[in-house]
């Protein structure tokens, strides 16, 4: 018995800035999850993943991420994706803090 397809978005990182980006219904990259296209059909998701992956000068690390569909738009299911929606964690913390 096959598992049902979980809704997904296409996500990556912008090559130049490193920002998290999402594939939009217009076939462009956007920076907000709420503007991302949500795929509920696996074949369509895979086809669009190939298209999104064909832009190595714009996006790196392109992949499908599971989301839940809510009244407020797509919401990440996995902690990693929730964390990525908050933007880069480029402030000094943990081992990055230089002790004087």
Image (cartoon, rainbow, N blue to C red):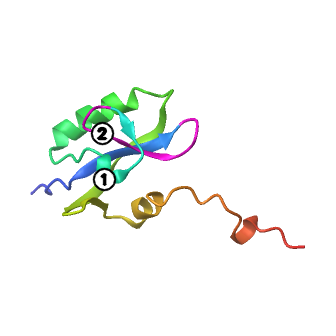
User: Is 87 placed above or below 19 here?
Assistant: below
Q: Is residue 54 above or below residue 33?
A: above
Q: Residue at x 58, y 35 (%)?
A: 16
Residue neighbourhood size for the residue with mark 2, other residues' Cα within 10 Å, grouped as few (<14), some (14–19), many (≥20) = many
Residue 83 bears which disc, if any?
Answer: none
Secondary structure at badge 2 equals: loop
Given residues 42 and 83, the one toward you in this image is 83
Q: Distance from label 1 to label 2 (Cα)?
A: 9 Å
> Left or right: where does residue 66 sit relative to residue 61?
left
Mark 1 Cα-neighbour bin, 10 Å: few <14, some 14–19, many ≥20: some
- Give me the residue at 69% from left, 69% from top: 93
* Quarter of the image with the N terminus in it: bottom left
Question: Where is residue 89 drawn, in percent x and y?
Answer: 59, 60
Say whether residue 91 is magenta: no
Q: Which residue is mark 2?
A: 24
**Do the numbered discs 1 and 2 sit on residues whose CB atoms are within 8 Å?**
no
Return the residue nearer the eye: 9 or 91: 91
Q: Which residues are magenta?
A: 15-27
The percent position of residue 94, horizontal first and vertical second, equals: 70, 71
Left or right? Give the position of 16 relative to 64.
right
**Relative to residue 44, is residue 62 drawn left or right?**
right
Give the percent coordinates (x, y) of residue 17: 58, 41
Residue underneath mark 1: 34
Name which quarter of the figure residue 96 lies in. bottom right
Q: Give the residue displayed 18% in from the left and 43% down from the top.
A: 42
Main secondary structure found in the magenta portion:
loop
Quadrant where the image shows the C terminus: bottom right
Q: Quadrant of residue 55?
A: top left
Q: Earlier in the sequence, mark 1 or mark 2?
A: 2
Instruction: Judge whether residue 18 is colored magenta.
Output: yes
């Amino acid at each position: 018995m096959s598992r049902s397809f979980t809704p997904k978005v296409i996500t990556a990182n912008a090559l130049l800035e490193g920002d998290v980006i999402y594939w939009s219904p217009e076939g462009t990259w956007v920076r907000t999850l709420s503007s991302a296209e949500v795929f509920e059909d696996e074949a369509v998701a895979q086809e669009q993943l190939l298209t999104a992956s064909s832009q190595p000068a714009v996006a790196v690390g392109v992949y499908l991420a599971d989301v839940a569909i809510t009244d407020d738009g797509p919401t990440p299911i996995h902690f990693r994706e929730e964390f990525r929606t908050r933007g880069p964690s480029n402030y000094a913390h943990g081992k990055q803090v230089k002790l004087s």
